[in-house]
Amino acid sequence: MRHNKSITGVFMIKSAAFLFSIFLFPSITFAQILDGGQSNNGGEVGPNGAKTYSNDVGFDGASSKDALYRFNRDVNDKLQQSRPKFARAFERTQDALIKGDMQKADKSIAELRDIKPANDYERARLHLINYWYYGKTGNQELEFDSASKLMAVGAGNIDPNAYVEAGMRLLKRQYNRQDIGGAIETLANLRKVPESSTELMTVVQAVKKLDDIAEEKTDFVQKINVNESGVWSAKLFKPRFFFNGVSGEINTLGFDCTNKQTTLPYKLDSVMEIPEAWGSCTMKVNAKPNTSFNLVQQKPV
C-alpha cells in the first residue's frame, strides 16, 4: 500500500480533513452490483464473480401536486405547536396551491419562509409546503430535496398519510436512481409511522433488497451510468469508497454533508474517506456525459 503525499499536502489526519490516499487496488470480493436494470433479469455474474441485481421494479408515482387534493391538511394546530403567524401563512400558501393561484402562492410561501421555524413541528410543515410547491411548479430536484428533509423531521409532526405519501415517492425515486444509501435512510424513516406498513407491502421485494444491503458487512458495489448531463448523486452508504472501471471521465466530486459542503477534484485510483465530523453526506459526481463507473463503498477496516 502506498500513500500519495502530493494530494493537497494536508490530508494526513483523517479527522482534520477529507482523506485522499492512493492505493494499489487489492483483490476485492465484490458483494453485489445493483446495476439500475442493466443486467438481464438480475441473474448475470459480474466482475470477480459478483452477482448482479436489477433494481428495476417499475417504480413510479404521481406528482406531489396531486397529493394536495388528497391530503388537504388541517392547519388549526390543535396541539398548538406552531405559532399563529406561521399557521396562518401555511394555510394561505396551501389554499393558493390547491386553487392553482401561483401568483398568490409565490407571495405567501415567501412570507412563510421568512418566518424562521421555531421547532421541528414548524420545520416539518415548511418542508411539506415546499414539497407541494415544487411539485406544483415542476421542479423535481427541489421537490424531492424537500421530501428528503421532510422525512428527517416529519414523523409525528405532520399527518401520517401525507408523510407516507411523500416518503413513498421519495423511496421509489431514490431506488430507481441508484441512491441506495438514501433509500435505506428513507425506509428507516417511513417505518417510524405505522401507517407506512401497508404501502411498504406493495414494494416488498425492494424493501427486502434494501434490508439485505443495510445488513451487509462486506464491500458494496454499484455499476453507475451517468446521464447526458454528466451528473449523478447519491447519499453515501459507507464513509470509505473508491471508483474503478471508469469509462469516460470523472471531473469533480461534490459533497453536501450535515456539517460540511465542498467540491474536490477527482483523483484517479484514489481511495477516499469521509471524516466522521462531516456527518451524513450526499456525493455528487460531475463527469463527462454518459460516463460509467463502479462505485465501491468499503466495509469498515
Image (cartoon, rainbow, N blue to C red):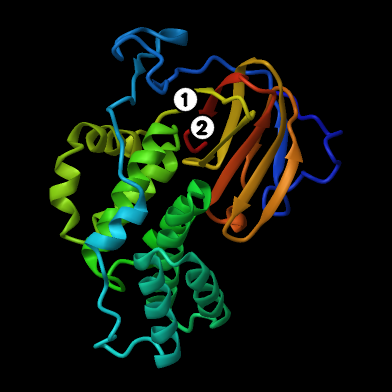
Give the residue type that dot 1 points to: Gln
**Relative image position of residue 78 (x, y in whole percent):** 24, 88
Upstream in the sequence, badge 2 or badge 1?
Answer: 1
Tell whether 91 sits left or right of 162.
right
Q: Residue at x 54, y 26 (%)?
A: 295
In front: 58, or 224? 58
Quadrant, the N terminus? top right
Query: In the displayed structure, would residue 7 be above or below residue 28?
Result: below
Between residues 20 and 161, which one lies in front from this camera angle?
161
Task: List x then y, in percent, for residue 283.
Answer: 59, 42
Tell me: 245 left or right of 96. right
Q: Can residue 295 be seen in the rendering of this structure?
A: yes
- The residue under label 2 is 297
Q: Element under label 2?
A: strand
Residue topped by disc 1: 222
Mark 2: which amino acid? Gln
